[in-house]
Structures are given as structure tokens and as C-alpha cells.
Amino acid sequence: MSDEWLDTIVDSRRDATARIVVLDLVSPADVELPEFVAGAHVDVLVDSADGLVRQYSLCGPPHDRTRYRLAVLAETASRGGSLGMHRLRKGDRLRISRPRNRFGVSDEARRHLLVAGGIGVTPLLAMAHALEAGGAEYELHYCARSRADSAFLDELEHNPRVRLHFDDGPDDQRFSAATDIGPPARDTAIYVCGPGGFMDFVISSALAAGWPSEAIHKERFAPVQDADVHTADGSFTVRLAKTGGEYEIKEGESVLDVLLAGGVDAPYSCGQGICGECIVRVLAGEPDHRDDILTDRERADGMFTTCSSRAHSPILELDL
């Protein structure tokens, strides 16, 4: 959880669709906000009384530090976050964290294929802004149920690098993994964000077509698995390398929850295994990875999410 909150003011608010609100946040001191890289998100303290914190992607141009732009979908099964954001009005104050990013543009790719489903367009829109400004080769596919459900059409539909796909539109404009993703292309990266089912379809289609997993970059707004899966299956011990402290992690408990209860200053934010803030390094033992954010390479390098993963070995030593 962020221990350094930034104060902002809602400078403008508009309803982009019946369910999506776009908010522009500025500094109350009329100074530049911290810089961010395309794909970044911030923690938002939606309700300070209840300590309600949610993560939202920054979707404005990264070079514009006068404001941060957020777009928030009103979830039908909201736990309070999206509805709280929709209640904001111009002039309201909002506390946010500094931006952070685990979904940035690949430095190794020459061409970039952005595939967005619904509100998943938010981080990809910032990427498109950055790629456009840098003269990079990219293509953005924006999939939505209908035009009425689509935000940012005013700035996207006349861009020749953007393809719009509506479920209720003609067949020839609907998204097709076979043609819109196509076979593997050297020096090309795929970026996917949107609802879970949509992301699973795009990713599985790309993998089936022969794309290497390293070429596919993703960001989820919700975990693939139920939280219960993160804490199931037996107990084990976590040892902290820096202090020598040992903590028993029982079935039904997460590593993060036990460490926080023990007074350990462990990093975290979403608590669901999708933001990456809680990642630490495993120094000894065999981890049981249950997150949906680490790449195979990062897992091989010893990275570990304390909020959602467990251990196959009796003891897991962490770099904490």
C-alpha cells in the first residue's frame, strides 16, 4: 500500500458513456504531477474513512504532466470502488499514489499490436499516445459491445492506426484473431487488456498461432482465480533473510496477511496478484506461483507474489 499519497483535485468530469466516467486530476498547488510511463496505474484512495483503495490506469498522454486522466467503468457488482469514483464531481479532492508500471511498452519490439476489450483500452490508449509521439509502428484494436459502450471514439475513430470492432456491427468489422493478430511476426509485441474472458481468448489464440509467450504482454483488472485458491493447500514456513524471523503460513492464510499481522513492512497494494507491488525475491525453497502477473522468466529469476502464491517446499526464504 502506498505510504506517500499525492493530493489531487478533479479538474473535469464527463460521462463518456452511460457507464464510463472520465476524470482529469490536477495538482492543487498548480504544479506538474510526477512523470509516468505509458501503461502505468495509480492507487486511488476512494474512501479514506473505510481505507478503500483501488487501482486505475492512466490513459492520458504520458508527456502531459499537468493532469492525470482516468476512465472508470461502473461495475454492476462493484465493491464500492467504481461507484465511489462515479460520485466524484469537479472540485472534489482525491488522494492517489505515485504512478507505477508493470505493463510498459517493450524496448525490444519494433512493432506493437495493442488489443483492448472495453475499459481495457485505458492503459493501451496511453501506449498509443506514447507510440504516436515517438513515431513507432503500432496498431490498436478496440473491441466493444457497441459504439454506445465505447469511450474515446472522438480521438480514435479517425486515427488510421486504430481498428474499431463492435459486437453489434457488421461481420466484416468484428475482431478476428486469425486476421487481426495473425501469425507470429518477428520484433512484434502484443499487448492485451480487458475482461478476463476476452483476454483469455486473445492470449490463447495468439499462443495457438505460434506466438511465443514472451511476446505477449498483459494486464488484468481482476484475478483469474478466486481468492480462496490463493490460500488453499496446507501450511509452510516463510523465513525472512534480513531478520531471520520465521512465520507459519497456515491453510486459509496468505503470506502477505501473515507478514503484515506480524508487523513486517512488506510491500503490497491490490492483494489479488495482479498489480505486482508485493513482488519479492525467493532466496531458497520452491515457490508455488498462483499469480497472473509474473512472466516465466521472472519466476525463473526468483520473483514471488506474497499476496497470492504459496510454497511447494516446507520453508520458503524471502529477501525481506
Image (cartoon, rainbow, N blue to C red):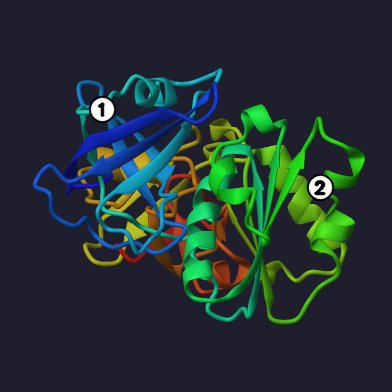
Residue 94 picture location, percent across and down: 22, 34
- Residue labelled with disc 2: 175
First in residue order: circle 2 vs circle 1: 1
Picture disc at residue 293 = none
**Residue 164 horizontal/vertical position (percent):** 72, 46
Q: Dot 1 corresponds to which residue?
A: 90
Outermost residue on the left side: it is 29
Give the amino acid at mark 2: Phe
Quadrant in the picture for residue 71: top left
Q: Are marks 2 and 1 in contact (CB under 8 Å)?
A: no
> In the drawing, does residue 81 fall left or right of residue 108?
left
SS assignment at label 1 = loop
Q: Residue visible at 53% across and 69% down? A: 131
Residue 154 place in picture, x, y as percent: 56, 43
Q: Nearer the viewer, mark 2 or mark 1?
A: 1
Q: Amino acid at mark 1?
A: Lys
Give the class, few, some or many, for how many residues have Cα within 10 Å of label 1's Cα (few <14, many ≥20).
some
Which residue is drawn at the image coordinates 27% and 41% (left, top)?
A: 25
Q: Position of residue 106 (x, y in %)?
A: 55, 73
Q: Residue at x 47, y 58 (%)?
A: 39
**From mark 2 to mark 1, how far is it between C-alphas?**
37 Å
Q: Quadrant of the N terminus?
A: top left
- Left or right for 285, reference 12: right
Q: Is residue 298 left or right of residue 171?
A: left
Task: Specify whether 241 is left or right of 187.
Answer: left
Q: Residue at x 21, y 62 (%)?
A: 243
Q: Nearer the viewer, residue 251 or 224?
A: 224
Q: Is residue 158 above or below residue 79?
A: below
* Residue 5 can be seen in this image: yes
When asked about the image quadrant of residue 170, the answer is top right
**One can see residue 253 in this view:** no
